[in-house]
Image: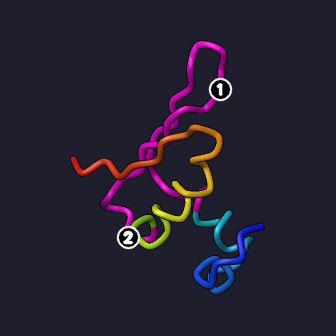
Amino acid sequence: MNDTPAFKRVGFFRLMQDVLTTTGQLYCDRQGKLILIQLKVADTLVRSWVDGLAALLELGHVVVYLDKT
C-alpha cells in the first residue's frame, strides 16, 4: 500500500468510496484491459486525488485524466 502522507490522511476505505462514486468514463482495449479513466472536473472530490490515482495506476499503463468539458 502507498505510504504517502496524503494517502494515509484520506484512508483506504474513504478513498475507495470516493473513487467508486465519482462520475466519469472507463475505457478498455479490445482484450478488456482498462487503459484510460476519464473523470469529470466538475466533481470537486476528484481534483484532490486525481494525481495520486494516476500515480497508482501508472505502473499498469492506465491513463487517468480530468475531462475539462
| Mark pair 1, 2: CA separation | 28 Å
Task: Give the answer, above or below, for where 21 lies relative to 67.
Answer: below
Which of the two residues, 33 or 43, is positioned nearer the viewer here? Answer: 33
Q: How is the image coloured?
A: rainbow
Instruction: Tell me the kind of residue under disc 1.
Output: Lys
Answer yes or no: do the residues labelled 1 and 2 have beta carbons within 8 Å? no
| Disc 1 residue crowd, few under 14, some 14–19, many 20+, Cα 10 Å | few
Residue type (three-letter) at the residue carrying disc 2: Thr
User: Looking at the image, which residue sits at the far front?
Assistant: 59
Q: Which residue is mark 2?
A: 44
Tag 1 secondary structure: loop
Residue name at image x 58 percent, y 37 percent: 61
Where does residue 59 sit, x and y in percent of width and height? 63, 45
Residue, x 38% and y 63% (percent of image)? 43
* In magenta stretch: residue 44: yes
Front of the two marks 1 and 2: 1
Task: Point out residue 1 in the picture as x, y percentages from the top left corner.
Answer: 78, 67
Q: Residue at x 52, y 36 (%)?
A: 26
Q: Quadrant of residue 19?
A: bottom right
Q: How many marks?
A: 2
Q: Residues within 10 Å of mark 2 (few under 14, many from 20)?
A: few
**Looking at the rendered structure, which numbered label has been put on residue 33?**
1
Query: Which segment did they paint magenta?
Result: 19-45
Q: Position of residue 51 (x, y in %)?
A: 46, 63
